[in-house]
Image: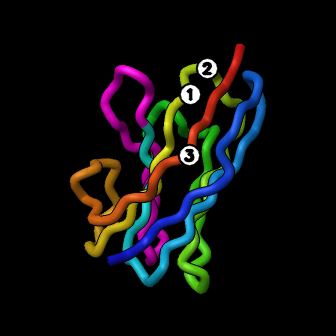
Amino acid sequence: QVQLVESGGGSVQAGGTLSLSCVASEYTVSMAWLRQAAGKEREGVAAIVKNGAIEYADSVKGRFTISQDSAKNTVLLGMNSLTPEDTAMYYCAAGRRWIVSLNSGAYNYWGQGTQVTVSS
C-alpha cells in the first residue's frame, strides 16, 4: 500500500502564493493533485506522469505548476495568483497506470489532504 504524505497548505490572501508537496512511500507511475471545496465535488487540478506528461485544469492554467522529483517520489504544486475560488482541501493522489488524468478514478492511492484557504 502506497502512503502519501502532503504538506504545505495554509492561509493566504488573494494574489498570494503557496506550494504543496506530496511524498510517496514508494515508486508510482502517475501522481496528481485534486481538490474539494465545501459543498462541491472533488475536481482534478493538475496531473503528471513519470515520462513528463502534464495536464492542468483550465481554471488553474498559467497559475499553478506541477513538478516531480522522481528520485524522491515527490510531486510539487506551485500555486500563484491565488483567488478565493481556490479555497479547498487539496489531495495528493497516485496511480499505477501510464495515463495523465484529472479524473479521480484514475488513481489508486490518496493522501489525507491539506487545506488551502484564500481570503479576499
Q: Identify which amino acid the numbered label 3 is placed on.
A: Thr
- Where residue 29 appears, as percent x and y from the top left, is 37, 76
- Sequence-wise, which precedes: disc 1 or disc 3? 1
Question: Residue shown at 77%/31% (left/top)?
Answer: 16
Here the colouring is: rainbow
Establish if 56 lies above or below 70. above
Tag of residue 87? 1
Label pair 3/2, CB-CB below 8 angstroms: no
**Label 2 neighbour load within 10 Å: few <14, some 14-19, many 20+:** some
Q: Secondary structure at mark 1?
A: loop
Question: Residue shown at 44%/77% (left/top)?
Answer: 51
- Where residue 59 appears, as percent x and y from the top left, is 49, 31
Tag of residue 59? none
Label pair 2/1, CB-CB below 8 angstroms: yes
Q: Which residues are magenta?
A: 36-55
Q: Identify which amino acid the numbered label 2 is placed on.
A: Pro
Q: Which residue is mark 3?
A: 114
Q: Which residue is mark 2?
A: 84
113 lies left or right of 41: right
- The quarter of the rendered structure image containing the C terminus is top right
Question: Residue shown at 45%/83% (left/top)?
Answer: 26
